[in-house]
Amino acid sequence: MVVIAITGAASGVGYEAARQLSAESEVTKLVLTVRSAQKAEVALSKLVQETGKDKSFYEFVVLDLSDLSSIKAAVPSFPAFDRICLNAGGLSTTTMHASGNGITENMVINTMGHAVLVDGLLAAGKLPAGSRVVYIGSEVARSLWSFVPMLPNYNGNFKEKDIDWAIGTNYNGCGSCCPIRKQLGDYKNSKIIGQMHFAHLAKEHPNIHWVSTSPGAIGGPFAEKGNFPVKQLMACMPCMFRCLCVTHACSPSVSMQIGTKRYVEVLTGEPKWESGSMPMSGKCGCCFWGGNGAMIDNRPKVSYFRDEALCEKTAAKVREWATRWEAVAPQQATMDPSTVVAKK
């Protein structure tokens, strides 16, 4: 019998993951993280109605991964769980984080917040041997030719010198004057760093199972935060992306349901992928084209993902930047944990 925690489960693919996991016979409880108790109540009521589960099947922890005080207060408030899905995040603005920590907003919400959370859970003994951690990465972290020229393409060229740049600088490479390219550049960098960080944690903690996966290209709420033309095309012409073999289906809602099945695959049953692997969409013909189709381990296919030394250096840099974050917000560690958890 399994208890699974999901970050960012109030809406979008996180909510859909909770809905699908509710139907799995081995899952006995879901712990959902949300940014407010009000959002939690809405999500839980909807889940109870849609799944037929008793309200006691669900618990929630209030957690804002962009707020260091919220992360530190949430760690001791987590009930015991067996597996955790680090799902929260998405496209954000091309700005630096408001705390003054020197980290990009996309990096904080997609990677840094989860890294701090996981290190906190490890230190608190809440990720014992036998646990499973699933980080939600993205196919944009490597080449994704269907999105050229909106998405920067590094052609496998991401080196040690790029780690600090990716964490502490809004994308300023080729075409950064274009808002969507700058936004997707920040998002790409956050997922590169996240996938490499958690790949190294698989080496640090071999008794815990670590995987980075992706729902693929699903559109929906994710695309709604995209700059022109992603938001407009996904809203008005979603079938175009399916016809181009980018998404799973013409309908964003159907595409999300299909993509979320990947979460269920890696979170339930016996581990199907080696610890540290990155099961995501594979190649279409001879290239990485879209975000659909059967999953393969992307790690051996991308030079910087399979570079274990680089992954180790990335994890060290992530922790170094997390320390800087704490230094600019020391008062955040004093928040009362009792104010951030409610159980249902």
Image (spheres, grey):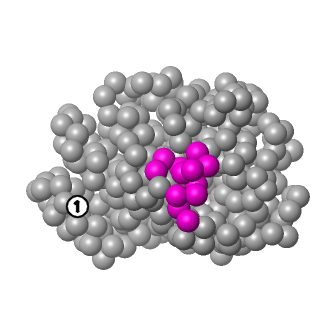
Q: How many marks?
A: 1
The residue located at (85%, 70%) in the rendering is: 177
Q: What element carries label 1?
A: helix
The residue located at (37%, 73%) in the rendering is: 36
Q: Where is residue 81 in the image (x, y as percent from the top left)?
A: 30, 43
- Residue 11 visible to an observer of this rendering: yes
Q: Position of residue 64 (x, y in %)?
A: 47, 66
- Viewer-proximal residue among 316 and 180: 180
Question: Which quadrant is the N terminus positioned in?
Answer: top left
Tag 1: residue type? Leu
Which residue carries the number 1 mark? 47
Give the crowd class for mark 1: few <14, some 14-19, many >=20 residues within 10 Å. many
Question: Which quadrant is the C terminus positioned in?
Answer: bottom left
Q: Position of residue 141 (x, y in %)?
A: 67, 45
Q: Where is residue 278 in the image (x, y as percent from the top left)?
A: 57, 33
Left or right: 164 as drawn, with respect to 100: right
Magenta-tinted stretch:
237-249
- Residue 217 visible to an observer of this rendering: no
Res. 4 image quadrant:
top left
The residue located at (54%, 51%) in the rendering is: 242
- Does 309 appear above or below 21? above
- Viewer-proximal residue among 173 and 101: 173
The residue located at (19%, 60%) in the rendering is: 50
Indicate yes or no whether the magenta region holds residue 241. yes
- Does 62 appear above or below 38? above
